Image (cartoon, coloured by chain):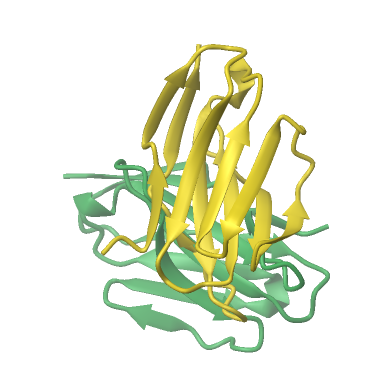
Chain colours: A green, B yellow
Amino acid sequence: AQKVTQAQTEISVVEKEDVTLDCVYETRDTTYYLFWYKQPPSGELVFLIRRNSFDEQNEISGRYSWNFQKSTSSFNFTITASQVVDSAVYFCALSEINTGKLIFGQGTTLQVKP
Amino acid sequence: DTAVSQTPKYLVTQMGNDKSIKCEQNLGHDTMYWYKQDSKKFLKIMFSYNNKELIINETVPNRFSPKSPDKAHLNLHINSLELGDSAVYFCASSPPGSYEQYFGPGTRLTVT
């Protein structure tokens, strides 16, 4: 079965701390896509990154970085020097290759305190 | 310009009523989706249409009926609303072969 697990339900950090959000997935597809979305308190879903299964290079975008490890079926997300505006629910998702539907993890609520 | 829009943003209604949520995308995408986010924030696919054709119907009660009049629109009609239908409903669209989905702002449905 296809599944995404975000074991951390809630994380609380103080501003400027680094924080890593874990994501573990299961899939029977050999080709697949992984995503991270951010849902701030205002409620919209904001796309952060897409990674395909053939590209295991880590990616950095400003304070955000992603570590994709196929060997452990993990796609972890690190925020460096966190800020209060990073407070949100973060979702990891897996795309089912035949239909394109997204299978979401349970979400991790990140609270960054000033 | 809003890429994926939904109306209404908020919908409060009583049990047993029938209601519709509308979704429109101006991105020229072929595929559109409906997702439901429950009170625990869990997001789950409900339906997907590709070029007006239903391709995913994910064990949703038949009180829910999606309708796609053209590839830019995907509406969701819900009959005989129940308390458990209270949730945030998100519409999304994606271009061919991309797998990246662009989400609308969501519609918060409250059934009393």
Image position of A57 with respect to B95: above or below: below
Question: Is residue B54 found left or right of A91 in the rendered image?
Answer: right
Residue at image coords 33%, 47%: A40
Horizontal side of residue B110 vs B67, given as left or right: left
Q: Nearer the viewer, residue A60 or B69?
A: B69
Query: In the drawing, does residue A53 fall left or right of residue B21?
Result: right
Residue A24 picture location, percent across and down: 65, 61
Residue that protrudes farthest toward the front in the picture: B69
Residue A105 visible (yes or no): no
Identify the residue shown where x is 65% and y is 45%. B66
A110 is higher (above) or lower (below) than A25:
above
Quarter assignment of residue A20: bottom left
- Total numbered labels: 0
Task: Provide residue B96's location: percent of width, then percent of height.
Answer: 59, 79
x%, y% of residue B75?
55, 46
In the image, residue A75 sits, relative to residue A44, either above or below, namely below
Q: State which quarter of the image contains the N terminus of chain B.
A: bottom left
Q: Residue at x 76, y 49 (%)?
A: B57
